[in-house]
Structures are given as structure tokens and as C-alpha cells.
Amino acid sequence: MKDIEKQLPLILIDNVDFTYPNGTKALRNINLKIDNKELIGIMGKNGAGKTTLIRTLNGLIRPTNGAIYLYGENIASKSIATLSKKVGVIFQNPLHQLFSNSVKDEIEFSLKSFEFTKEEIQNKTNEILKEFNLEKYRNRSPLNLSGGEAKKLALASIICRDPDIIVFDEPTLGQDGREIEFLINLIKNKRKKGKTIIIVTHNIEFANEHIPRTILMADGLILADGPTEKVLGNQILVEKASLILPQTHQLNLALKKSGIQCPNDLFSKDKLINFIRDFIKNKTSEIVEGND
Amino acid sequence: MSLEFLNAFKFMKKDSFIHNLDPRAKLIFALIYSISALLFTEIIPLILIFLSLIPLILAGKLIKQWLKSIQGLSYLILIIIIMNTFFLSLSFAISMIIRICIMVSAFSIFFLTSDPNDLALSLISMKFPYEFAFSLSLAFRFIPTIATEAQNIIDAQQSRGYEMQKSGLINQIKNLFPLLIPLIICSIKRAFNVAEALESRAFGSKKERTYYYTIKYSFKDWIFTLYLLSFLIISIIVRINFAIMPDWLSWELIV
Amino acid sequence: MTLIEYKNFYYRYKGNEEYALNNINLKIEDNKFILLCGETGSGKTTLIRCMNGLIPQFYSGFYRGSVEVAGKDTTITAIADLSTEVGIVFQNPENQLVAMNVEHEIAFGLENLGIESGEISKKIKEVTKITEIEHLLNKAPFELSGGEQQRVAIASILVLEPKIIVLDEPTALLDPYMAKKIIELLKEIQIEKQITILISEHRLDLILPYADELILMKDGNLIEHDNSNKIINGINFQTLRLNKPVIYSIFNQLKEEKLFNQYIPASISKVINYLKGL
């Protein structure tokens, strides 16, 4: 029995449909397997069903057809509160959840539904405030934080529950370079600790650089599911999902069109740097040779 | 009582006789029907008034939504029957129920068929101050937006382990804070955003305002208003002369 | 021709101890496509609010110095009067659409200015053509997609014929394809109408190919304002923690390796031109 359990994916979405009461088919025939410790991106047009899909993972939305399995168990009978202990979903707008008197209270609110002792809650709060560099705002009202700090607090209030599966909804929205760096480090740390991470994003460059597996969605359907470099390189699907090619792929395409000889798979920054570096070196050495 | 009940008052664009009437005529309709309902406590006249609503509901193609509004009232109806049966008569209870149904239906028809913007326009043509009429249409315009926001807030808080159902009155009130505070804050922020967008488009300019869209009372509206006025006059006459009205009009349920 | 001029301008929001804008000296000229960038909290939105008088008239606070728009002082000229010089499109189109349908939305600003109905009709036709929303005139705001909403917001500002349109993170809520289309539309408008477009954005890769000038901000200070080539190759751009495009990273590194010593290319086509020219 235990061996079979080990082979089961962590999350299994089996033939799921979801239709809103007004008739909109938000999810159609979704089949998805997510294994432990994966890092996955979900991309697509606005209205493609991305946010609907992540809402099914913690029970906010129940499928109208099909089933979802977590750790091999059907989640249909589990409450949102129970599921949210394992699946932490961080939504886009921090203002949709901040309401406490202080940053510390905000974290403690999230920890309340677990059966921790007062001491454990205090310890966990201190830890998470340190981890997110929010210690200096401990007693400040969450509504007095800047946009970036508020977003971190919203993150912290889900991460403090230490969910096994972390789901981000547009985490790079409105973020500058240092905030995205913080996010990248957070994701790296959590992966090291064995967490599974799912990111809904529009940020193609971010996905191309940091996310190994991408799912493309349009009109409630999954168009593609595979290694990011490949999925984002398929121009037809990328257009259907209302995205654009990452700059690396655009450059690769442009190089080919311009007649410059280059390998077919220059899809990463490093490969491109190496190629261009060699290209420049060759061309300048040609000139030097020519002058001789 | 779910939020579904509110759908019974949400405007939906349709092409029907009722939809095409001026919103002022419909407001007069809702008011006159409510007044007529308040004039009577006897069951039969109230039933007659109620029945006269049905052709209007049909003309407006509103059956589904109207039934939803009555459905939403079902709890209230139950409470009234229970309370009234203990304290007064069942007959009185039924009259009250029909009265409420009439008033709710009349206003429901008004809200379902009146584009809030048309209402604002008609208020303006009645020389109401522009800012007032505009605030009204803004409020309506943002209702669906705020409803979506409320749902998003519920989702965000539930994802943190927040539980909607709590026991005990004090707990239930405390439990509203995580929903109400974000909603209020977001609404205030939204109000600021809308205000600055309006300012940036010359709202409040000292120049005399032009009105690109206008709304006028048409022939149909006058006929309808005439019908409403006759309806009111007949109701008043019947009420005053109730003693000399035929017996079946004052039939009562003996309980 | 200078459209907007900041002279030694300081601004502090009421209730804040720190200044949101420190000693801003800035001239914005006509017929330019300008990118405003900086880390979050650097004062970009505050700077934008000064451009049509929202600061200091709508937002309470303390200021020093002056901001002039087409020669008019923004502290005393009514915001309504400045709206024909500077148009601002804010981040969330949802909160800017106030009318019952698209046609009325576009007419709104003109109604406020007392423009006569026939004239309004003409202007609506013109503006909906450029923004390609003629087929949406009868739709209500909630029936529109994000990209369509943003187009309507832009049209409703463009119809007031300002000399500069300022946009605060216009693509934030849009998917990449829509975002690209909106930026292309804005560039078209800039060229056709010969007005200035100023965009505050984090998604640099989308805008850099089109920008004539860049303004860099940090901690409420304006640290650099110049044409885009100079700025992209400067030390400020390099050190600011912005979301720099991949081609920037590639050529910046090659520059550091001394293999490349020209202007770092801002677009794919410039990269190809460079490589072909070798």
C-alpha cells in the first residue's frame, strides 16, 4: 500500500469542470498532475480560468464535475479551513485581507485556527516577522504600510502557517527589482524545505528565468503543460494564451530571421550571452585577420 | 437569506414595454402601488392589487427574477405568520404578507427595469442638482464592483483559515471584522480613485455643463402615469366608501 | 516647447514626516515618449499627481517651489482648467469608468467643459477611430475586458485634447499581449497627434523600445532625466533595482567584459542591427 501511495501525485485534478451559476464555463476538462516539490507556473489570458483553477485547490470553488485529490484523498468533503492548512493561497490584493490593529496581530490571526499554545504562536510570529524583515513594523497598523510592505505582510500571513503547497496569485504585480529578488529567494528557500509551489503570473520573463514547468490556459482549457522554455517557445500557443514570447525567444527568432547562423535553442540568458560573446569574438578576430 | 435575493433588484437590460418606460413613471408606479397596499387591511382588495401586478411582470419579462424576490421573502413571511398567529389573527397575518409582497414586488419591478443612469438623467431633467443625480448613478454603477470585491475578500480571508460560521452572537459580530474592515478600506480607496479620475476630467468645472444624453417623457409614459393616477383614485374611493362596497370585498378568514 | 516645469519643488503628504518629493527640477517637452521609472516608493505616482494639480489641491500636504503647466501655476489654477493641458490615466481602469456606456464615458469630460453636443459627437467619432473602440460604443463598462477598459479610459482622456497624456502603470492589470497593444497604441497616438506621452512603468521591457527619454527617480529625488540611450548606459540605471530587460543584462555584462562599447540596445531590432553590422 505504501509504495502505491508514494507514486500518487501530490495534487491530482481529474477531469474537472466548473461552470458559474450564470452559465460561464470557467474550467473545462482540466486534467493535471502535480508532484511533490515541483515549481509550476500557470499563465494565460485574463479570464482563462487561472484564478478559478487555484481556487479549487483549497476548496473556495468546488468543481461541478470531476474530482480533486490531495495526498491521494478526495478533497470534496474537506472544509476550506482544513484545506487551507495544507494549501496556502496568497491573493493579489493585500488590502483584501489586512484588518488587524497591528502587524503582529495580523500574523496571529492567521495562526489562530491551529491548536497552538500561546507560546508557540508567539514564537512563530517572531520567526516570520524576522524572516520577512517586518520586525520593525511589529506594532504598526497594517494599513499604514507601503504597498510593497503590505504585500510582504500578506505573504507572511500565509507562509506562517507553513503550508506544504504554496500558491501565488500574481506575486510580481507592481513589484520592482528588489521586491522580486526577495520573492525569488523566498521561493528558493521554500523549495529547499520541500514545499510545492504554484505561481499564477503574467510575468513571462520571470517565468522563463525561474519556473521550470508552465501550464498555459485559455478559455477554461489547458493548452499546454511542459518545460517552460518549450511551452513559451510555441508561438501559436503563446498567442492563443494572449502572451508574448520571452525576450530570449524573441531574440532567437530574430537572429534566425536575419540570417545569422545560430543554434535552435538559445532560450536562456546564459546561452544567449555565450552565443553573442562568441559571435563578437569571431567577428572581431575576422576583422583582425582581414587587416593582416 | 442569501445574496441571491439581491439579484431580484439588479437592473438587467431588456427590450420590453416596462423597460422602455421612463424611470420616473416607474418610480411613481412603485410609490402608488405601495400607497394602495397600505390603504387596505382586508384580504380581497389586497389580492386584487397584487393580481394587477402580474400583467406588468409578464410585460416586463420578469417572472424569474420576481419569483426570486418572493422566495427571498419566505423567511420573513414565516416569521410574520408565526408572530401574528400568536398575537393577532391569521387573517391579519395573511393581509400583512400580501401587503409586503405587493410593496416588494412593485419596487423590485422598478429596480429591475430602470437603468440607474436613466434615473439619474430623469432626476437632472427635473432640475435636481447634477452632483446629487450623478452620485446616485455612480453608486449604482459600482454595486457589482463592490459585490465582486466582497467575494474576493471572503476568499482571501478563508484562505487564512477564517471561518464564516461562528456560534454565539458576540462571536458572530467579532467575526464580521475581517470582512468589513477590508471592504470599507477598499471602498474608501476606490472612492478616492474615482474622485481623482473625475477631477482629472474636469468634473466640477465652472463652465455650464452640456448634457449629451437627455431623457424625455413620451406618450407611453403619460398613458401609464394616467393609468396609475386612476388606479390611486379608485383605491382611495373604494377605501372611503368601503361600507357601501359589495360584501365579498370584506370577506375574512375566520381564525 | 516646455509643457510642464517643476522648479525646486518639494512635497510632503499630510501626516507623513518624510518628503515624498525632494527638490524636483524637471522640464517636460512636447512631442516626446517618456518612461518614468524607479523603485516602488520612489515618488513616481506623487510626481504624476502634481502634473494636473491633484497635488496640492486634491491631496492635502505641504509643498515648496512651483509646478507650472503650460505656464499656469498648478497650485492656483483649477484642476478642471488644467485637464485640457494634461490628461492622466490611472492604474485601474475600473475606477475611471463612471458612465453607463462607452459613448457616454467619452462624452463625460466634454460635457463637464460645456462643449456643445454636435461638437461632442464629432470628437467621439475621431477618438474612437484612433483607439479602435468604435464597435464598443454601446457597451457598459463591466462588459469590457481589461484591455478594452484601458482603451476606453485612454479615449476618454484623449478626447479632451491634452498636450500630454500621463499614464500610471497602465499595463499593470493587463496580460502581456494586451499590454503590448496598448503601448503600441500610445506610441501611435504620440506620433499622430504630436503630443507627449509619459508612462510610469515597472515592465521596462515593453516600453524601452519606444521611449525617447527616461526619468529616473529614487527616494523622492529625480536622479536623472535624459534621452533613453544615455540613461540606459549610465551608472544610475545600472544600480537601481529595476526589472531590467534580458537584452540589457546580456549587453551590460558584455560591456563589463569589455567586448562591447556602444549604446546598450533597447530593443530586439537594435540588437540584430548591431550584430549584422559587425
Image (cartoon, rainbow, N blue to C red):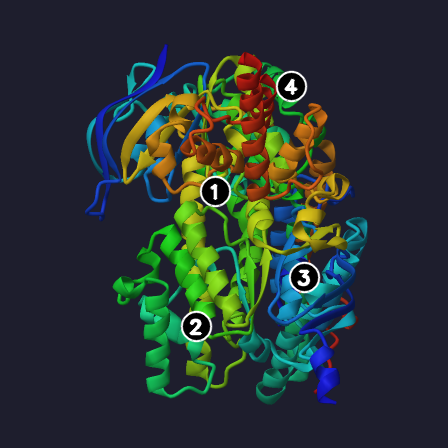
A204 vs C68, nearest the viewer: A204
- Categorize mark 2 by other alpha carbons within 10 Å: few (<14), some (14-19), many (20+): many
The x, y position of residue A279, in whole percent, is 59, 29
Same chain assignment for discs 1 and 3: no
C65 vs A274, nearest the viewer: A274
Q: Chain of mark 2?
A: A
The x, y position of residue B219, in whole percent, is 73, 32
Residue B103 visible (yes or no): no
Q: Which residue has dot 4 on it?
A: C125
Q: Cα distance, mark 4 to mark 1?
A: 28 Å
Please indicate whether residue C17 sits to the left or right of residue B153 in the image.
Answer: left
- N-terminal-most mark, 3 or 2: 3
Q: Cα distance, mark 2 to mark 1?
A: 43 Å
Q: Amino acid at mark 4?
A: Lys
Residue A223 visible (yes or no): yes
Same chain assignment for discs 2 and 1: no
Q: Which residue has dot 2 on it?
A: A160
Give residue A53's mark.
3
A68 vs B153, nearest the viewer: A68
Q: Which residue has dot 1 on it?
A: B135
- Categorize mark 3 by other alpha carbons within 10 Å: few (<14), some (14-19), many (20+): many
Q: Secondary structure at mark 4?
A: helix
Q: Amino acid at mark 3?
A: Leu
Residue at 50% across / 72% down in the picture? A193
Same chain assignment for discs 4 and 2: no
Quadrant of the rendered structure where residue B174 is?
bottom left
Mark in front: 4 vs 2: 2
Residue at the top extreme?
A: C1
Image quadrant holding the C terminus of chain B, namely bottom right
